[in-house]
Image: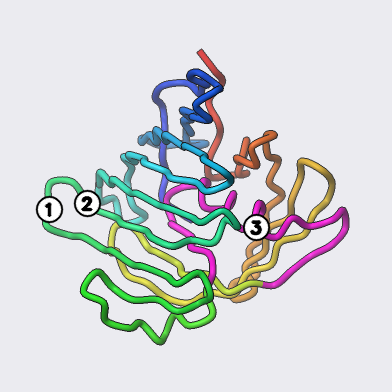
Amino acid sequence: MKVLLAHGRGSRMLRPSMNELHVAWAPWSGPGHEHLVLREVSGALTAHSTVEGVSDQGRRFSLRYFLRTDSACRVREVELALLGSDARLSLRSDGAGQWSDDKGRSQPELDGCIDVDISVTPFTNTLPIRRLGLAPDASDDIAVVYLDVPSLSTRRCRQRYTSLGPALYLFESLETGFRAELPVDPASLVLDYPGLFRRLPPR
């Protein structure tokens, strides 16, 4: 999660009865922006988002992603597209850790992953936080599909989430040793991701 995002529209809720949220994050430094539209129906989430940023190598990118979960917050579909190019990535899951591409070809290297981690957004932290439903002081180790932007490469990564309270979680990468305490709102959306992302206030 090293790509910088940022300034843009503030977060706001439109017609709460529709269970639709509009959320934006800014970087702690550097250019970029993410605007996320999140819809929830009977516990299942659909997310549409546009991210603009600059990679660690100084490469500017514009990304559009779509993600869909089932009612248990298990990722069933994720699509990423780099605007202005032909670069696309599309994955499907059976919700039990088996993945395939958009042509139905199996992706055995991703076996056992329930969640995804898109490198340029704090949104995907919401998925395991919701799915695991950890009690205070409880933790769980998970495997996720890590989706790197702008390369659109995939790999299997091991992570750990620990509940530090009703609205605070410790995230750890079990491969790099990276750690971050993530405060979240009532929808389990990240408010601050120290050093990387900062939630914009509602307008």
N-terminal of the two: label 2 or label 3?
Answer: 2
Query: Crowding at label 2, few (<14), some or many (≥20) Cα neighbours within 10 Å?
Result: many
Residue position marked by numbered label 3 in the rendering:
131
Point out which mark residue 85 bears. Answer: 1
The residue lying at 69 percent from left, 67 percent from top is 160
Per the image, label 3 sits on a secondary structure element best described as helix
The residue lying at 53 percent from left, 75 percent from top is 96
8, 21: nearer the viewer: 21
Query: In the rendered structure, are the residues bearing label 1 and label 2 in contact, judged by CB atoms less than 8 Å apart?
Result: yes
Q: Quadrant of residue 6?
A: top left
> What is the three-letter code of the residue carrying label 1?
Ser
The residue lying at 67 percent from left, 64 percent from top is 172
Per the image, label 1 sits on a secondary structure element best described as loop
From the top left corner, tell me how far across and down residue 119 is, in percent: 44, 57
The residue lying at 56 percent from left, 20 percent from top is 201
From the top left corner, tell me how far across and down residue 104 is, in percent: 26, 77
Could you tell me how far apart the alpha carbons at marks 2 and 3 are, in whole angstroms? 28 Å
> What is the three-letter code of the residue carrying label 3?
Arg
From the top left corner, tell me how far across and down residue 173 is, in percent: 62, 68
Residue position marked by numbered label 2 in the rendering:
82
- Please determine whether, in this image, residue 70 is positioned above or below residue 189: below
Could you tell me how far apart the alpha carbons at marks 1 and 2 are, in whole angstroms? 6 Å
Could you tell me how far apart the alpha carbons at marks 1 and 3 are, in whole angstroms? 34 Å
Magenta range: 114-141
- Please determine whether, in this image, residue 163 is positioned above or below residue 196: below
Magenta residue check for 7? no
45, 171: nearer the viewer: 45
